[in-house]
């Protein structure tokens, strides 16, 4: 403990000396960055990261390279404080997780490296997954968003009803329970109603043909989410992709440049409950539900949904089956209020954790 304390003091001096005067001038009375009533070591870690905007000339201090990337920077300072407050239990395992993850060091302080935090309501943290549930009002409707960070694409998985392709439909709760380490799930494209292709789930191809009638979404194994307007995707294009999941429903809610749209390949553009997969970058996603068909939340139009996705910062977004199917499911129950109690489903797209070693 004394060694760690000395290390923290030295590291803070290396990184923070230029900023001490500025902090004093600000006269801040509280370091409670998390808004939890009192400052903690986690608050200090996040504050230190905010302050370290200029790269430190500290690469000679190899003992400070906690992320083991060959460079000493603000990430190492943040990691040290996370370790001090118990959020990292094994520095070698921590560095290994960062070196192989989809996000690398980016957003690493959103994860938890000393076990698992799970409130059973969708909020979850481990070394592999971070999920935060956000609720609010937009366009006169209630929305429910799971903000998702994963270091491994296997933390996003499709679950079929009855655990089999074309199995009889089941409730969202039952579908989530079929995934042993499932955290939160969103209804999919209800593939079994039409069997449009191509259909790939968890890397397995079930339907080969490519429909020309609908927009298509593809999640690749490198974590990238791609959307294609109808009649664009070809077999040759598909063959170049390392595909993990494909949905055929739509429409795509943002154009090829990530901007809003006003025209959609859909006949259901009026106010309705909606389900959306949102994408920021490989490793960072969102499940979005907008409730509808009730007094204070009548549903959102496709045009407004496109605008909302842009406001949320999505770079790509894809509309899934909506209406009575729309559900964001946690272990303790539905997070949103599905219309008329919801309906049974053929598939659920689930955030899950990797097996704990």
Image (tube, helix red, strand yellow):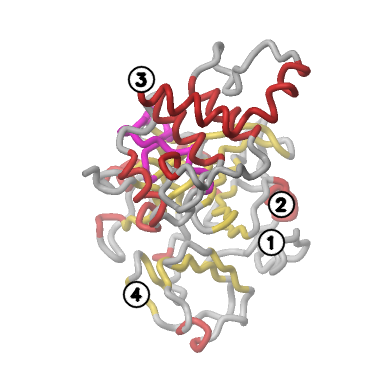
Residue position marked by numbered label 4 in the rendering: 206
- Whichever of labels 2 and 3 marks the residue nearer the N terminus, that label is 3
- Whichever of labels 2 and 4 marks the residue nearer the N terminus, that label is 4
In the rendered image of this protein, does residue 351 appear above or below residue 346?
above
In the rendered image of this protein, does residue 237 appear above or below residue 88?
below
Residues drawn in magenta: 106-128
Q: Residue 6, position in %: x, y?
A: 43, 23
Residue position marked by numbered label 1 in the rendering: 254
Badge nearest the viewer, 2 or 3: 3
- Residue at the far front in the pictured view: 60
Q: Residue 153, position in %: x, y?
A: 40, 58
Q: Residue at x 60, y 46 (%)?
A: 273
Q: Mark 3 and mark 4: span between their CA atoms?
A: 58 Å
Q: Residue at x 45, y 84 (%)?
A: 239
Residue position marked by numbered label 2 in the rendering: 310
Mark linked to residue 2: 3
């Amino acid at each position: 403990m004394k060694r760690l304390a000395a290390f923290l003091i030295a590291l803070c001096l290396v990184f923070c000396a230029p900023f001490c005067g500025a902090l004093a001038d600000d006269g801040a009375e509280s370091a409670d960055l998390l808004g939890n009533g009192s400052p903690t070591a986690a608050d200090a870690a996040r504050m230190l990261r905010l302050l370290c905007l200029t790269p430190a000339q500290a690469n000679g201090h190899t003992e400070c390279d906690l992320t083991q990337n060959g460079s000493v920077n603000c990430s190492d300072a943040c990691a040290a404080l996370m370790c001090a407050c118990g959020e990292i239990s094994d520095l070698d395992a921590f560095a290994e997780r960062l070196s192989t993850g989809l996000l690398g060091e980016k957003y690493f302080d959103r994860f938890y490296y000393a076990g698992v935090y799970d409130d059973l309501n969708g909020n979850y943290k481990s070394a592999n997954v971070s999920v935060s549930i956000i609720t609010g009002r937009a366009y006169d409707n209630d929305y429910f968003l799971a903000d998702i960070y994963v270091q491994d694409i296997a933390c996003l998985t499709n679950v079929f009803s009855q655990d089999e392709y074309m199995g009889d439909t089941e409730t969202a709760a039952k579908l989530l329970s079929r995934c042993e380490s499932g955290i939160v799930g969103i209804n999919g494209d209800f593939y079994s109603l039409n069997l449009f292709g191509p259909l790939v789930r968890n890397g397995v191809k079930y339907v080969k043909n490519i429909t020309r009638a609908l927009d298509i979404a593809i999640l690749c194994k490198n974590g990238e989410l791609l959307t294609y307007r109808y009649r664009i995707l070809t077999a040759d294009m598909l063959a170049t992709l390392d595909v993990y999941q494909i949905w055929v429903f739509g429409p795509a809610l943002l154009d090829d440049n990530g901007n809003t749209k006003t025209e959609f390949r859909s006949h259901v553009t009026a106010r309705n409950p909606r389900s959306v997969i949102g994408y920021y970058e490989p490793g960072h996603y969102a499940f979005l539900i907008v409730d509808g068909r009730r007094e204070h939340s009548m549903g959102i139009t496709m045009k407004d949904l496109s605008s909302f996705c842009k406001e949320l910062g999505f770079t790509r977004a894809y509309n899934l089956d909506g209406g009575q199917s729309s559900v964001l499911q946690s272990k303790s129950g539905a997070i949103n209020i599905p219309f008329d109690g919801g309906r049974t489903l053929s598939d659920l797209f689930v955030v899950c954790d990797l097996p704990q070693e």
